[in-house]
Image (spheres, rainbow, N blue to C red):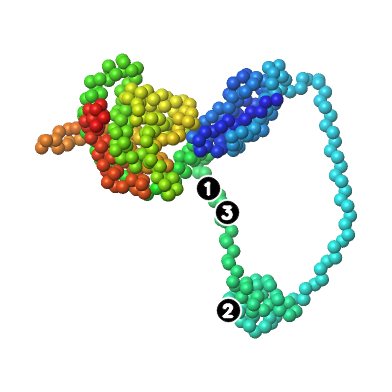
Amino acid sequence: MTDIVVPPLGESVSSATIARWLKKAGEAVALDEPLVELETDKVTVEVNAAVAGVIESIAAEEGAEVGPGAVLGVIKEGAAAAAKPAAGTPSKPTPAPAAPAQPKAEAPTPAPGPVSRPAEGASHGPAANKAMADAGITAEQVGARSGKDGRVTKGDVLAFLSKPAAAPAPAAAKAPRALEAGEERVKMTRLRQTIARRLKEAQNTAAMLTTFNEVDMGAAMALRAEYKDAFEKKHGVKLGFMSFFVKACVAALKEFPAVNAEIDGDEIVYKHAVHMGIAVGGPSGLVVPVVRNADQMGFAEIEKTIGSYGKKARDGALKLEELTGGSFTITNGGIYGSLMSTPILNPPQSGILGMHKIQERPMAVGGKVEIRPMMYIALSYDHRIVDGKEAVSFLVRVKESIEDPRRLMLDL
């Protein structure tokens, strides 16, 4: 017999939910055949068969939460292993359960004698009665009766009043409202729950501010138009604007390292490498794969990596290690038509750049009005670690690099 075990789930992932069993108990499975899908906070993970055989049993059903190393089921090895006993094969008789042992008779416990207690409303002494009247309580509420013949004393009342108030019982969970015609209730996926939790956590934890600027995309568009065919012919990948912004952010992060840092307790962790998160939309929601060591990459390698991640995100094939360890994030709402927005930090990062739609607008250039392709850019940052001057200067450096791409080629 071989156990079906939850594999390691990656950095900072402690549990997963069984999303779907691909095989049932009694079904034959081949070596490395997918058996079950697990949904984590970040991605969907398939668990494959470690041996060929038949699924003997399933230990955890769909919807159950499991941790790394948990046993999900058992495989009976051997391709010829039978899932069920053949017809006509007598099954082993099930032994009848043993009769429960009769408990030993115990000697009856004598009932306690009656406690002498005055009737409610009877006198408990002037001091005790006055104290209870002033507090608006009764002897039954006080409970303790240390006086003669079971009477309440003033000391009992004062002791009762000095007790801390009991914590109110937790409010019952709000029942879901009844659905109206045309409505449907669908449980949130773990990924969507995590997105909601982390975004709210960022707002509650960080001192988040956003600064804006605008970029004239004319020079970058001209450079791209001039070299896009030669670039694709040589490198086998299209030249997009994302690589321009990655390179521009890398240059700015080197100049303003606090934007690439994070807070850990009462310390600041500065990072000497740039691991650039690129927000992309997947079938289950927004994911942020990380271009590791982006500061050491050229335009072609950046474009290839981003293109590969985009395909994996659409196919739901991103790996856990591809989604962790980012130090800064870029998100592009412009591909959906967004003209301006305020991006939310991706904890524990201290900065995120928002790109937006390129739109022609009248601009004053050299004392004349010209129609220019403009883009609003936004930097959301954690003011606990990044000062306003640094944030504004960072965004100006990005603007300068995009408006004069030669700066990126010359590392200026």
Q: Amino acid at mark 2?
A: Asp
Query: Which of the 4 image quadrants contains residue 45?
Result: top right
Task: Give the quarter of the figure containing the C terminus.
Answer: top left
388 is higher (above) or lower (below) than 109? above
Locate residue 172, reporting x and y percent: 57, 53
Q: Amino acid at mark 3?
A: Ala
| Mark 2 and mark 3: Cα distance apart in space | 34 Å
Give the camera-side residue of 255 and 121: 255
117 is higher (above) or lower (below) than 219? below
| Mark 3 and mark 1: Cα distance apart in space | 14 Å
Locate residue 337, reporting x and y percent: 32, 34
Give the camera-side residue of 136 and 409: 409
SS class of the residue under badge 3?
Answer: loop
| Residue with the most extreme bottom position | 126
Q: Is residue 301 visible?
A: yes
Query: Which of the 4 image quadrants contains residue 302?
Result: top left
Q: Amino acid at mark 1?
A: Arg
User: Dot 1 corresponds to which residue?
Assistant: 177
**Mark in front: 2 vs 3:** 2
Residue shown at 35%/35% (left/top)? 330
Q: Is residue 280 visible?
A: no
Locate residue 28, reporting x and y percent: 66, 20
**Mark in front: 3 vs 1:** 3
Locate residue 84, reporting x and y percent: 74, 23
| Residue with the most extreme left position | 367
User: Dot 2 corresponds to which residue?
Assistant: 134
Q: Badge 2 local density, few (<14 within 10 Å), some, or many (20+)?
A: few
SS class of the residue under badge 2?
Answer: helix
